[in-house]
Amino acid sequence: MSKLAPTPESSKAPEILFPLAIVGLAITTIAITLSLNVRTYDAAAVSSQDYDAPAGRKILSSFEAKDLAVIEAEKKSTIKSDVLVAWKSQQTGRFLASSADSITNYFYKQTSTVHPWAAYDFKTPVRGFVFNESNIGDWITAKGKAVNQTALDAELVIENDRAVKFTSERNGYTLDGAAALAGLKKTLLADKESFTLPLRTSTPAVQLADLNNLGINTLISTGATDFTGSSAARITNVRVGASKYNGVIVAPGQEFSFNKYLGPVDAEHGFLPELVIKPEGATPEFGGGLCQVSTTAFRAAFFGGLPITQRRNHSYAVRYYEWISDDQPRAVGLDATIYSPYQDMKFVNDTEGSILVWTRIEGKRLYFDFYGTKDDRQVTVDGPHPFDRRANGAVRSTVSRTVVQNGETREITFNSSYIPPKVAEQTFELPAAAPPAPIN
């Protein structure tokens, strides 16, 4: 009986390759199937009606314009809704996305909107709008002129315990126009409520803290009032009065007295006659309008969380003291009247460093800036809230301040009562003068 010859290895190849071929065919079939299933983005053009469904048209051709907050380096501003509407092209039609990185594609990535993007291939026109880059560019150009500035070194010269020269250091800023344009578009398409300006920042070489050892390092508080509508004489008195406080340095623990630094109020010292409330009625007197200055100083101390040791509101509500800031409604209740030597405005410097008082006038607004040492105090203000307003001009108001520092909470409330102007003139009485200081 003959033996079978051994089977060569080559004859086993078909047996091995055949199952592999079957597996390969299956994999190919699955790949083709998957390819067909994901080909929505590469599909042939579809009729424009497929892209112009109501849902897609609403997303692409309109947006609800609302005010947009703009965050700048050291402040905030607002772009009004009517400006944003003007940035949208008035022509709404069919257009092509320029690339996969276009704003339209960005919108899809941000919202994951299915329609009309499900079959979008960047070749088929869709219905939508484009931004008016010219209008946006004009806004960016104007904003650049407003915010661009070079860095400024600090300057501080103190003589006889008073600053005679002062400049606070200032960062330099340059607006990146291209980044602002792209960022604004993305912000509007994403329906965000705020936009941060893309600014390049440069720092000054000389800081305020480098120039003194008194703790006068940075801005810690600002008070502001608006004297729009004042007469020429009143404006003069405001300017002269504010100059009396430029450079005043309040040491730690010291009580600041407004009347102490005011000095004589007469023609020799630059003041002009202006209306002042007196027992005989509103009478022209040198220094009329100085309460604009005392009110501004009071607000700097109040918003800075400093202890207020003496403050009195005016007998009747005065319109010059209703403006508090552009972000708040006009309201009475944050004024501080003075009448030397009878009525004063006082506060205490309870910070660790000295406070430098510096005043400035911009347009028809007066500012008191306090420079010193920042601490961990948190200041919140509620009000002012006017109430019980009468037709004859009488009104009451309340404002509260809470200071949280080192785990302790301090609260103070100022209740102001304003009588009718005519009654105030008839019943005016000067407060009792402060007792004379003891002679050492």
Image (tube, helix red, strand yellow):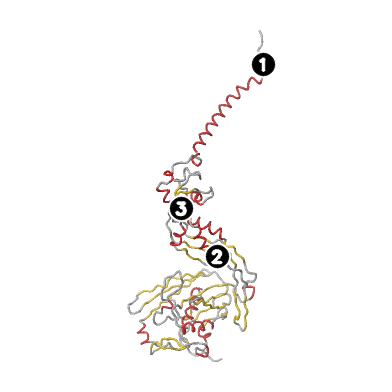
Instruction: Find the distance from the CA under tag 1 to the CA under tag 3.
Output: 79 Å
Mark 3 belongs to which amino acid? Phe
Answer left or right for 204 relative to 65. Answer: right
Pointer 1 residue: 6
Q: Position of residue 106 (x, y in %)?
A: 51, 50
Q: Which residue is mark 3?
A: 129
Circle 3 packing at 10 Å, graded few (<14), some (14-19), many (20+), is: many
The label shown at residue 144 is: 2
**Residue at image x 63%, y 22%?**
13
Q: Nearer the viewer, residue 7 or 402?
A: 7
Nearer to us in this view, 75 or 214: 75
Residue 225 in the image, given as x and y percentages of width and height: 47, 76
Name the residue: 53% across, 58% down: 181
Q: Which is nearer the N-term, disc 1 or disc 3?
A: 1
Position of the N terminus by quadrant: top right
Residue at x-position 63% and y-position 69%: 204
Task: Judge the density around disc 2: few (<14), some (14-19), many (≥20) Cα neighbours within 10 Å.
Answer: some
In space, the residues marked 2 and 1 are separated at their CA atoms by 90 Å
Give the amino acid at mark 2.
Gly
Separation of marks 3 and 2 at Cα, in angstroms = 27 Å
Examine the image and state in which quarter residue 50 appears: top left
The x, y position of residue 86, in whole percent, is 45, 60
Q: Residue at x 33, y 80 (%)?
A: 392
